[in-house]
Image (cartoon, rainbow, N blue to C red):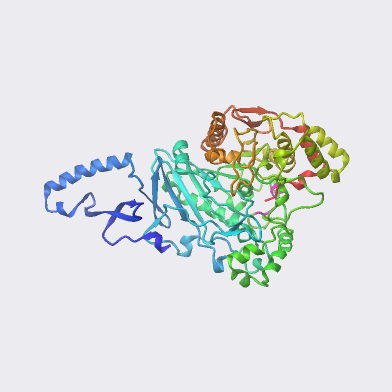
């Protein structure tokens, strides 16, 4: 950290810093103490009148600073020391703040360690004007994928419209998705910004957490000597550590530690649900939004450690000392991405193969999670889980972000029927015929083309995500005293999305990510110029999410689940149920065993 810390010479008080971005130099504005009440320059020290002038100037200066922070300037004190951040677009940002000791060397595959307790805080002023490294990962999820990131990655970032608001502001903590395998809390268009903080008058926190084998590898050799007598789920422990940091420090950024909302998308949504169930996260947040997360996971630690022996075999290691000595690339290349337990999860956007399941990434480790989530809810009364207002969301065509067929956009209805018949026939002719009846070419389609693609991705999304998460919301409503809300994004954007590193397919309909991109104003990045309907959709998403974060409930017009499900188009509407007959088909035929995992 030494290159990012600015030492303060003894006897000098740095009131603020100015950065010349073109020269990449830091200029310090120096002030000298004459008394506790008067700050003047040396030239005025011998003149009595100069002191009076200085007092008047100081009063004017303080009045000005109270209203208008200097451009590019911000300082905040945390429990670990001072931060230097930025002011831009109506809000402050503090990026790349360490929230735990770097999990390197002997700390690899161990619970995160507190910086203060470990005596590893910085000296001077920490440069929080830029993001730091993402956590180790490969893109794409293959043995030969590009290795990215460093293990010293446990950083978070804060965006706030005011450091000293009249009333503490609500806090929203963002947990990014990416299969628990990839991406970061600093993706453009998929994370908070100064503009979002200013517009919504909310404090935002985004964090990086350990991913893939570094964050979730459960192995017996890693459990030996563990202070928790467990292995795996290190990434969830990182998230909990970050939430503890928020509780201790967010008041310094103008945030209300008593109004913290966690929200995440995809595996970030799975993380949200995990944190609701974890006794370690008790009291660290007060509302939760789960966007397109998993339905359930219930793998035991013992079974996961057995499944992950394939990883150990590939490394050639016999013990934890050897594993902790491996290079980052060696770890990532040893992950069985396609071979069972198949951490790449390639087939999750296709109808399942009968009897073929994926191995777990997140597990019931008896530390972060004491029991499978549904079992935890069903037991009830023990106070181990977080009973907070809960939003469960999905998009209607979740799998349209990465369908398994390259030519799906050119399918005819004949192609559609052939593929569906081929994929579902192993489950029985009666089920296949029923599916073709319920998902047929007469289904409404908001566009004049690509309708077979829309219907196929709707079908797979229903069986893998949407219908099971109706059941999840039902179970939550039965277990929680707090309100539960359910939404389904049905909006079709004005044009197809541009493919990118984290949006691999030019989705046309209500694809996975659509709600989160709308909230973070990332739609323009993937769609180009937005239509009025696109703008209306993203404004609606923002309106309801921010209201929920501020109030702990949705506005009166949005009823609690199970009395209604909100359909989010360019306008909001409500239905009492979604595709009941279709969902019954998948549930009654055991398809909830094949839902999205991790």
Who is closer to the viewer here, 378 or 400? 400
Q: Quadrant of residue 533?
A: top right
Give the residue displayed 35% in from the left and 52% down from the top.
22
- The stretch in magenta equals 369-375
- Give x and y (percent) for residue 435: 81, 36
Locate residue 446 relative to residue 86 in the image: left or right: right
Q: Establish if 222 lies above or below 269.
A: below
Question: Is residue 239 visible to the viewer in this orientation of the structure?
Answer: yes
Give the residue displayed 61% in from the left and 52% down from the top.
279
Q: Is residue 371 magenta?
A: yes
Q: Establish if 443 lies above or below 470.
A: above
For the N terminus, which image quadrant? bottom left
- Give x and y (percent) for residue 336: 70, 61
- Give x and y (percent) for residue 334: 66, 64
Give the residue displayed 85% in from the left and 46% down from the top.
426
Q: Establish if 45 lies above or below 592.
A: below
Who is closer to the viewer here, 470 or 561? 470
Question: Is residue 466 visible to the viewer in this orientation of the structure?
Answer: no
Q: Is residue 417 magenta?
A: no
Locate residue 82 relative to residue 313 in the image: left or right: left
Quick one: which residue is furthest to the right in this view?
429
How many numbered tags mark residues here? Answer: 0
- Give x and y (percent) for residue 238: 56, 56
Q: Quadrant of residue 341?
A: bottom right
Give the residue displayed 12% in from the left and 53% down from the top.
46
Who is closer to the viewer here, 43 or 493? 493
Q: Establish if 397 lies above or below 134.
A: above
């Amino acid at each position: 950290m030494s290159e990012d810390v600015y030492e303060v010479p003894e006897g000098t008080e740095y009131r603020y810093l100015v950065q010349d971005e073109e020269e990449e130099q830091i200029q310090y504005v120096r002030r000298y103490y004459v008394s506790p009440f008067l700050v003047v320059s040396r030239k005025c020290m011998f003149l009595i009148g100069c002191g009076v002038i200085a007092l008047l100037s100081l009063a004017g200066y303080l009045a000005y600073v109270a209203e208008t922070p200097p451009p590019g300037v911000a300082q905040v004190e945390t429990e670990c020391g001072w931060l230097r951040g930025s002011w831009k677009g109506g809000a402050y940002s503090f990026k790349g703040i360490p929230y735990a000791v770097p999990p390197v060397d002997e700390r690899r595959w161990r619970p995160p360690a507190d910086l203060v307790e470990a005596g590893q805080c910085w000296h001077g002023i920490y440069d929080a004007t830029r993001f730091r490294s993402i956590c180790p990962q490969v893109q794409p999820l293959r043995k030969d994928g590009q290795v990215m990131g460093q293990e010293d990655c446990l950083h978070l970032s804060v965006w706030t419209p005011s450091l000293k608001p009249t009333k503490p502001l609500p806090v929203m903590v963002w947990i990014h998705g990416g299969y628990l395998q990839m991406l970061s809390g600093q993706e453009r268009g998929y994370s908070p910004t100064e503009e979002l903080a200013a517009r919504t008058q909310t404090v935002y926190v985004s964090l990086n957490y350990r991913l893939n084998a570094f964050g979730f590898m459960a192995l017996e050799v890693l459990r030996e000597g563990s202070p928790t007598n467990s292995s795996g789920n290190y990434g969830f422990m990182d998230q909990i550590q970050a939430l503890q940091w928020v509780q201790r420090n967010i008041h310094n950024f103008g945030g209300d530690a008593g109004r913290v909302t966690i929200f995440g998308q995809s595996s970030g949504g799975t993380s949200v649900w995990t944190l609701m169930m974890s006794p370690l996260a008790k009291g660290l947040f007060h509302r939760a939004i789960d966007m397109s997360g998993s339905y359930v996971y219930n793998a035991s630690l013992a079974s996961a450690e057995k499944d992950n022996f394939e990883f150990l075999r590939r490394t050639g290691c016999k013990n934890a000392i050897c594993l902790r000595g491996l290079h980052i690339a060696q770890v990532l290349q040893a992950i069985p991405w396609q071979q069972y337990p198949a951490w790449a999860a390639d087939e999750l956007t296709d109808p399942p193969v009968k009897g073929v399941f994926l191995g777990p990434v997140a597990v019931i480790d008896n530390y972060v999670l004491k029991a499978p989530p549904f079992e935890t809810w069903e037991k009830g009364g023990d106070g181990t889980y977080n009973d907070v207002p809960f939003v469960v969301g999905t998009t209607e065509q979740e799998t349209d972000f990465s369908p398994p067929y390259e030519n799906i956009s050119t399918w005819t209805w004949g192609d559609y029927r052939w593929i569906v018949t081929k994929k579902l026939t192993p489950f029985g002719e009666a089920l296949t015929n029923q599916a073709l009846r319920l998902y047929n070419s007469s289904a409404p389609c908001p566009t004049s083309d690509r309708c077979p693609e829309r219907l196929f991705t709707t079908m797979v999304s229903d069986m893998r995500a949407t219908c099971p998460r109706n059941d999840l919301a039902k179970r939550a409503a039965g277990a929680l005293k707090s309100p539960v809300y359910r939404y389904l994004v049905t909006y079709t954007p004005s044009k197809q999305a541009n493919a990118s590193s984290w949006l691999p397919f030019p989705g046309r309909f209500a694809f996975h990510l659509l709600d989160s991109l709308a909230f973070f104003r990332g739609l323009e990045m993937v769609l180009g110029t937005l239509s009025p309907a696109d703008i209306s959709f993203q404004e609606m998403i923002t309106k309801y999410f921010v209201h929920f974060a501020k109030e702990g409930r949705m506005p009166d017009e949005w009823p609690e689940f199970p009395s209604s499900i909100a359909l989010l188009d360019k306008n909001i509407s409500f239905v009492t149920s979604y595709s009941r007959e279709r969902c019954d088909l998948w549930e009654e035929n055991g398809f909830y065993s094949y839902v999205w995992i991790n």
